[in-house]
Amino acid sequence: MRASCPSRPARVALAGLAAGVSLLASGGARADDPASQASALRADNTSLATRSQQVLLRLYSLKTRLAQSQARVQGLEEQGARLERETDSAQRQLAIARSDMASAHSQLGARLRQLYVEGDVDPLAVLLGAESLDDALSALDGLNRLAEQDRTIIEQLTKAKESLRTALTRLATRRAELRAALDEAKDANANLLRVQAQQSAYLGSLRRQQDLNRSQIANLSAQAAASEQQSEDVSSGGGGGGGGQPPGPPPASGSKVTVSSTGYCLTGTTAIGIPVAWGVVAVDPSFIPLGTRMFVPGYGEGVAADTGSAVKGATIDLWFPSCARALAWGRRTVTITLH
């Protein structure tokens, strides 16, 4: 927040000195303040750490899903290999059945040709040519057995061929379904690998940004420490409580008022470019007019030199050259003397 400008030139300078106090009192942070920049980078690193943890959890989940996906792909490939073996076996059996069928037909044809050549295919001729009834019955029974055997062999071979054809058709359907499932599983696995690569790259970028922030924080912290030490050195030469010595006695005259005081430790420069200094007090002008000199017990002499959005009514803000002193002061109720 900018310092207010009273009419007298002396008040203008004091208001500029108090601008840093009002900024800190209102929660603001100057962009050129190393301590504020380091604080912002630390907050950014906290956010980066949270996002990194979330990405790690996603990567752990992806790793589990990838293992499941790869196991599914492997299982489907093994099923495919078994189906291939079953198909090969069925095709070999079908080839054997066809060969057996051809052999049976060939044997049946040869037998029929032999019977026709020998002239024993007519049952009546068999009966007439038999020397006895037993010979005739035996011959007829032999013909029936041969015919039945041939018929049974052909029926069995026909059923085997049909069964093998059905099995091959079923295997072909299963192979097509398995191929589709395998393609889908491989696509899902490839997609998981892409997501894993993207998340790993994102995690790497978050960690690189964290490392960069840490390096900048270290530099800014060194700058802030140097600035604080410089401010400490400057303020230690001042009078009153600025040098860390016990403040002098309160003035003999003046009006007393009880207020709530807060200590702050902003380093750097004020809004008008003048370094902050001991004795700058931010006030509510409607309660304590700007330019009013005051004595604060435990702190020393000060001047109402600026305002702050958080400074309302019976409240004041006191500047300290180090955060340790500001924290030691904290927030306390004091009775000040206005003079």
Image (cartoon, rainbow, N blue to C red):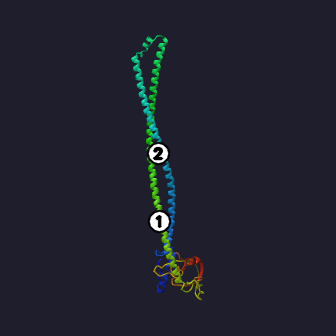
**Horizontal and vertical percent for residue 132?**
48, 10
Q: Quadrant of residue 260?
A: bottom right
Q: Is residue 119 left or right of residue 34?
A: left
Nearer to us of marks 1 and 2 is: 2
Q: Is residue 214 above or below residue 249?
A: above
On screen, residue 112 versus residue 249, left or right, reads left
User: In what element is the residue under mark 2?
Assistant: helix
Q: Which label's residue is closer to the chain start, 1 or 2?
A: 2
Q: Is residue 140 above or below residue 161?
A: above
**Which residue sits at x=46%, y=36%?**
89
Judging from the image, what secondary structure is the residue with disc 1 in? helix
Q: Nearer the viewer, residue 180 or 257?
A: 180
Contact between marks 1 and 2 (CB within 8 A): the answer is: no
Residue 87 is marked as none
Q: Residue at x 47, y 20 (%)?
A: 145
How packed mark 2 is, by other alpha carbons closer than 10 Å (few <14, some 14-19, many 20 or more), is some
Image spot of residue 47 (x, y percent): 50, 65
Circle 1 residues within 10 Å: few <14, some 14–19, many ≥20: few
Where in the figure is residue 331, as x and y percent of width and height?
58, 76
Kind of residue at disc 2: Glu
Q: Which residue is mark 1?
A: 208
Name which quarter of the figure residue 107 lies in.
top left
Residue 30 picture location, percent across and down: 47, 75
Image quadrant in which the C terminus is located: bottom right
Name the residue at 40% across, 19% down.
114
Of 169 and 119, the residue lying toward us: 119
Residue 12 located left or right of residue 251: left
Q: Is residue 161 above or below residue 326?
A: above
Disc 1 residue type (three-letter)? Arg
User: Does residue 97 appear anywhere in the picture?
Assistant: yes
Total number of numbered discs in the rendering: 2
The residue singled out by tag 2 in the image is: 77
